[in-house]
Image (tube, grey):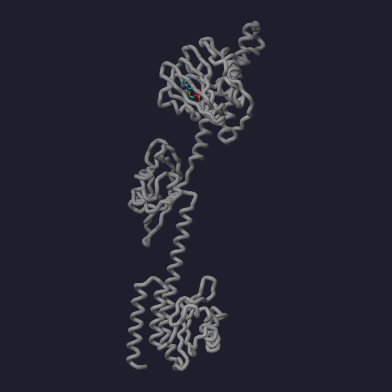
Amino acid sequence: MLPDFQLLQRNYLLRISQAMSSQLDLRALLKIIMENAVELLAGQAGLIVLRQQNGKLSPAVSIGLPREAVPHFSPLWDDVPPDSDGIPDISRRLVLAARAARIPLRQVVALPLNAEGQNRGYIFIFRARGAASFTESDSETLRTFANHAAIAVHNAYLYRQVLSERERLNAIIENSGDGVMMINPFRIIKSWNSTLAKLTGISAEEAIGQPCYAVLNLKTKQGVSVCHTQCPILHPPASGQLYAEGFFERKDGVKIAFADKYSPLHDEDGHASQYIANMRDVTRQREADDLKETLLAVISHELKTPVSIIKGYAGTLAREDAHWDTQTLREGLSVIEEEADKLNALITNFLEASRLQTGNLKLHMTEVYLPEMAERAVNTLRATTDRHTFSLEFPDDFPTIHGDYERLSQVLTNLISNAIKYSPKGGKIRVGGETTPTSVRLFVADEGIGIPAAEQELIFERFHRVDNGLTRQAPGTGLGLFLVKAVTQAHGGSVWVESTLGAGSTFWVELPK
Ligand code: ADP
């Protein structure tokens, strides 16, 4: 081989190496390789075909060929088995291709682009009719170019694989039903998925780059920071994984219970360099647990009292050695009846509350005339107190409305019995109504202890009771107003209270006409 030629070849290859280390665009790179190969081998045209994902070969870059002619060259690579080391019968294939493309090419040299034992395609160099045939040494020369092209294609393939793997991972993390964040050894948040953003109301932009304890300071029920006391980076767990639970309070005041699992990612030295935190919203489970706990406490407290009164009276009245006069018997039995009524009301409230929990409040709508309903409720409850006076204040033209009779009576009964219960010194209880152009309003007003302003919304929550001396003494479950609100809302209405501490409260129920 001529020294000049070797020098030239070295120059070409140098150019290609430079392009390969600076260029990431595969097509541009293949073009440079091919231009140099065609030039060095004094060819007229060149073509590189690459194997697609489906295993088929298809043209990727060409030079010296009109664009529309390129597809006609397919006889060159059609039916070439993927494990073939070269293209069998190449001269006959070229004749077919040249004829189909109407280009007078006579000579061809082709080499496979193989990398890591896999064929990624072929490089073809053509000479026109009348030019010298390709020699064995031309093939040798082309081999170096083919190797470079194969490496470039292989790298691009790997790069694409890494990219798509990364996209796949990102998609899995992004679409995970759990919140996912990653923290580094300095407790800085490195990633934050959309579920976590949705749960916390904090976007990835706000969270990433911040210390995790500043963004998501989980606290225990007692208010202790989980992020400091149980942080896996400050206190590495012996077993690797760490499980923690805590609450997070969103900007809108909603409290979310989180169950977190921290898993370490290890560096080459085996040190945990990052932690992946998997955060699950367990608010509903916690609520259900709390509900169960409260329910048990309330049941044992509230149900036991009437039951033991009933048992005490029944046992006493049934004693065989005692002869009770009629008066005592009647009084005893009426206590039993009253307590049984209380039990009944309690049980109804419990059942309703659990029905609401499962979202099963069905209304049986009929025509309802509220003044009549209020009169009945007042008459029933009047018998339970001798300290209170009652007045009914409905305008004469009060309209009938569409509603669930049983449930609305329960609303009235709950409000009136609260009015009695929470005005221990007695006083007047007014039950009445008003109309507006689109709705009717019911009110129950008492002259009792009143409700502090800060509690006036909270009392409608399940099990919420105002923490004062009287509430502690007065029996109750904290379910009454919860039911009042649920029933009112199911009717498309609303409920609120106006109250002055020490002077009394007025509960309002507004229902659409
Ligand atoms: P319960 O009466 O069983 O405790 P409710 O849900 O009916 O439950 O009421 C919740 C809380 O609201 C009561 O514990 C009480 O502190 C307060 N409350 C309700 N009605 C009145 C009222 N008329 N006057 C003062 N406080 C009231």
Q: 18 or 354, which is in the foreground?
A: 18
The picture places residue 81, in percent across and down from the top left corner, at: 56, 80
Please, which residue is most extreme toward the right here? 320
Question: Looking at the rendering, in which quadrant would you find the C terminus?
Answer: top right
Residue 347, can we see it? no
Q: Residue at x 44, y 48 (%)?
A: 196
Q: Answer with left or right where residue 373 lies relative to residue 499.
A: right
Q: Is the residue 129 above or below the residue 456 in the image? A: below
In front of the other: 506 or 271: 506
Q: Which residue is drawn at 49% across and 78% down?
A: 68
Q: Residue at x 41, y 41 (%)?
A: 248
The one of 157 and 8 positioned closer to us in this rendering: 8
Quadrant showing the N terminus: bottom left
* Residue at image point 33% right, 52% down: 186
Q: Among all residues in the image, which is located at the extreme front?
A: 437
* Residue 128 shows in this picture: yes
- Give the x, y percent position of residue 198: 45, 46
Q: Where is residue 191 in the image (x, y as percent from the top left)?
A: 39, 53
How many labels, in total? Answer: 0
Q: Is residue 211 above or below residue 311?
A: below
Left or right: 306 in relation to 321? left
Q: Where is residue 53 in the image (x, y as percent from the top left)?
A: 52, 70
